[in-house]
Image (cartoon, helix red, strand yellow):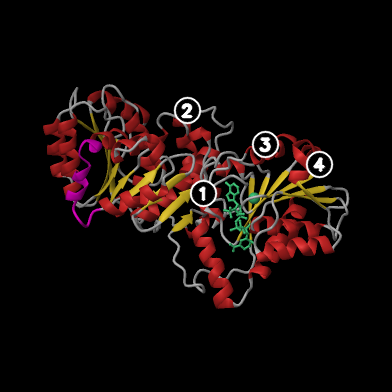
Amino acid sequence: MFVITSKEMKELEKRTITDFDISEEILMERAGISVVQAIWNEYGEFSNKSFVIICGSGNNGGDGYVVARDLLNYTEAVRVISVGHPTTEVAKKNYERYLKHGGIVYTYSELGLEGASKIISEADIVVDALFGTGLNREINDEELTKLIEVMNLYSKCIVSVDIPSGVCADDGKIMGCAVQADLTVTFGLPKVGHFLFPGRELCGKLKIAKIGIPSLDMLTCDINKELITTEKLRLPNRPRWSNKGTYSQVIIIGGSNKYIGAPVLSALSALRSGASMVKVVSVSKVCQCAMSHDPALICVNIGEDFNVEKLEDFIATVSKDVVFVVGPGWDTQNSEEKLSIIKKLLLTSNTLIIDADGLNVLSQNIDLLREKNSSKSVILTPHPGEFSRLTKKSLEKVKQNYELVHEFSKEYGVITVLKDATSIVSDGKKIYFNITGNTSLSKAGSGDILSGLLAGLISQHLEPVEAVKTGVYVFGLAGEMVPVEGMNSAFSILNYIPEAFKRLRESK
Ligand SMILES: NC(=O)C1=CN([C@@H]2O[C@H](COP(=O)(O)OP(=O)(O)OC[C@H]3O[C@@H](n4cnc5c(N)ncnc54)[C@H](OP(=O)(O)O)[C@@H]3O)[C@@H](O)[C@H]2O)[C@@H](O)CC1
Ligand SMILES: [K+]
């Protein structure tokens, strides 16, 4: 499903109006009616319910007046609190129409905070039509801030029109203060702010209503952002005649005497996601740990401690058709030598996934990525801390920064997975958001599982970007399958991976 910014929404609206002769008025009418329908579907019939609609001065408020008018068809218990007189032609029209239908409007300036609080607290459902995609600055007006606080404090239930007021549609950030909705009804296509935190949390349940905007193909509009959903996800093809040689090997280079388990988690995850042969190349202790967990793993022991020559010798023996994961549990000692290993791996034509300390080492010389073999796919799987080191930008600046993920991937010719509660993937062309998962994944070791899972999928010949999309989605699903959220070790997530794949297959 495509995901858009407020600017893109305006463009779609413009083209709908000019190229398809569907007026702004029709769009607003359908938007308002779709909100009423969504409320009915969610909360049941209206005869015993009371409503208050908080309308701002723009078109979001205009939608609010349509909602109010339509609700009058079902109940008299409808009130509007207007915050500023409607300023757009179409909002004014709908304000007038609501009045003509006998609608009651209180102005916030006359009511004051106390009056507004009373009306809000008495209503069963508060419809938030204060600001939508037109919010263009921080809300710093004291009276507005207080009104939003009152809405959050006293409402029994809030339904936001398009987006919770105060949430920026383009990055999910709170512009001063914001409404916490129970249900949000958006129009046409979801906005980025619906999927990035804190906006994602403030939406409550999200419904996407069709209001008559033609498809992107018809509008000849190129949108480069998508939400990862099951329909388009690819799964590996495993022909019945295949044998272990049909698939690529997965080789995990990582682990240290400090972090023994990380590469083992990666390796076990690769097996769970379908890899046929997984090697762990590491120090003795890691190899022992790997063997004790699964004798089917193949270990290449490089000695008691990190040994660059042995690693180099091993890499020289590796055939073309291999998926490398480098970094889980590596630690950052001997970073110069480790950097030279990454350089060697970049020059081979195999697929390379760089994770964890592999990324921390790489951040000392990110330009190494420019030397990669041009036919090679390189996937980086940073969490925000690692991405901040890679880009030399503060954590604040990189968190959820989908544009940066896009630019970075384009500049270095890599696929980047910025892991977070909403993960962001880019191959430098498109941007994908993944929203599966929960806090069962917020655990040491879970990143190692993801890198192994991606390697396992690529070893079964999925295109790297397809493997990454499927991988992050399935990984999230596996996290959601933990019986009690958060009460788990990352290790236990491994058990849910096959089941998560099954669920995805069945849902297609
Ligand atoms: N696109 C479509 O296809 C469709 C769009 N539709 C609907 O239109 C909505 C977008 O409408 P919109 O563009 O009129 O903007 P909206 O969100 O009402 O806010 C603008 C008002 O807020 C004000 N304002 C802004 N920031 C402020 C602040 N911090 N503090 C105080 N004031 C602030 C701003 O003031 P100004 O900047 O002019 O001073 C202006 O008055 C969209 O979300 C959807 O609901 C539907 O009808 C269906 C079709
Ligand atoms: K709103």
**Residue holding disc 1:** 502
In front of the other: 335 or 126: 126
Per the model, the C-alpha gap separating discs 2 and 3 is 43 Å
**Residue holding disc 3:** 146
Q: Which residues are magenta?
A: 362-376
The x and y percentages for residue 294 are 36, 32
Per the model, the C-alpha gap separating discs 1 and 4 is 50 Å
Residue drawn at (32%, 33%) of the image? 263
Q: Is ligand 1 within 8 Å of the beta carbon of the residue shown at mark 3?
A: no
Q: Earlier in the sequence, mark 2 or mark 4?
A: 4
**Residue holding disc 2:** 489
Q: Is residue 141 above or below residue 187?
A: above
Does the segment drawn in magenta span residue 11?
no
Q: Is residue 439 above or below residue 168?
A: above
Residue 156 in view, yes or no: no
Per the model, the C-alpha gap separating discs 4 and 3 is 15 Å
**Residue holding disc 4:** 119
The x and y percentages for residue 429 are 36, 58
Q: Nearer the viewer, mark 1 or mark 3?
A: 3
Q: Nearer the viewer, mark 2 or mark 4?
A: 4
Q: Nearer the viewer, mark 1 or mark 4?
A: 4
Q: Secondary structure at mark 2?
A: loop
In front of the other: 39 or 23: 23
Per the model, the C-alpha gap separating discs 1 and 2 is 22 Å
Q: Amino acid at mark 3?
A: Lys
Q: Amino acid at mark 4?
A: Ile
Q: Secondary structure at mark 1?
A: helix
Q: Earlier in the sequence, mark 1 or mark 3?
A: 3
Q: Is ligand 2 within 8 Å of the beta carbon of the residue shown at mark 2?
A: no
Q: Earlier in the sequence, mark 1 or mark 4?
A: 4
In front of the other: 145 or 129: 145
